[in-house]
Amino acid sequence: MIATRRFAALALALAAAAAAGESWTVASGEVRVRCRLTVGGSFDAVTPEISGSLLLDDAGGPRVSGQLRVRLDSLDTGMELRNAHLRETYLEVDRGEEFREAVLTAVELGEPFPPGARDHETGFAGLLSLHGMERWVEGEARLVRRDGRVRVEAGFPLSLGEFAIPPPRYLGVGVRDEIRITVTFDAAIAPSPPGATP
């Protein structure tokens, strides 16, 4: 669930970097969910299972087609028992694909990537599908373009309650409702064939 929210931010960032007529395909990356505990301290849930592609509309506007996906059943907190509780009890990944993945679509950029720029920061918004529900998320992203690739670093806050996910609790210690999602990935740039849809 946490990964899904961060993922949404990432998709928006990717869209911002793209130029009209270009397709961006995720090559590698990482989603990190920071969970703050009710008694102080925190732990991270991490996964490298990010995939997807985005296509900027032909008019060069703020809306981006395509999607970004994160496998929630691969989130790793560094503790086997905590992993089982997170995936099975709270994210309920066994209920089906819409629970096993977080998907970001309908991305809209705050500011398009300036022509000729290599380093750009922008806000973004996108529709996040998580835990069988859809909610809009917003965040900030930094995009660095180099040699036919773009590196995206994005982050956004997410409320577990908005996706009907009860904050995890174990032995009297719980996770706060708001988690922080950070997405980092590298994407390959390619010209999009006419009529292509990621």
Image (cartoon, helix red, strand yellow):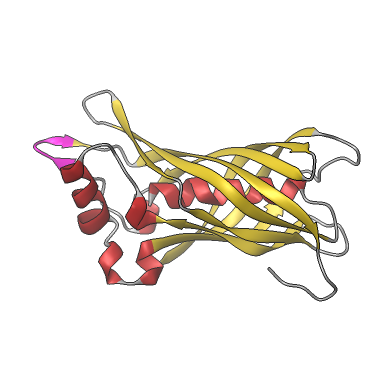
Residue 157 drawn at (x, y percent):
48, 40
Residue reaching furthest to the top: 40
**Picture residue at 28% right of the left edge, 70% below the top:** 95
Give the image quarter of residue 99: bottom left
**Picture residue at 67% right of the left edge, 39% below the top:** 151
Give the image quarter of residue 142: top right
Give the image quarter of residue 172: top left
Residue 83 drawn at (x, y percent):
24, 46
Magenta segment, which residues? Answer: 169-173
Q: Nearer the viewer, residue 24 or 95?
A: 24
Q: Nearer the viewer, residue 197 or 139?
A: 197
Q: Nearer the viewer, residue 34 or 151?
A: 151
Is residue 50 among what the camera can see? yes
Residue reaching furthest to the bottom: 195
Is residue 129 among what the camera can see? no
Q: How many marks?
A: 0
**Picture residue at 24% right of the left edge, 30% below the top:** 38
**The C terminus - image quarter:** bottom right
- Asked if residue 146 lies in the magenta stretch, the reply is no
137 on left or right of 16: left
Magenta highlight: main SS: strand
74 on left or right of 103: left
62 on left or right of 91: right
**Picture residue at 87% right of the left edge, 40% below the top:** 114
Residue 9 drawn at (x, y percent):
57, 46
Asked if 182 appears above or below 96 in the picture, the reply is: above
- Asked if residue 171 lies in the magenta stretch, the reply is yes
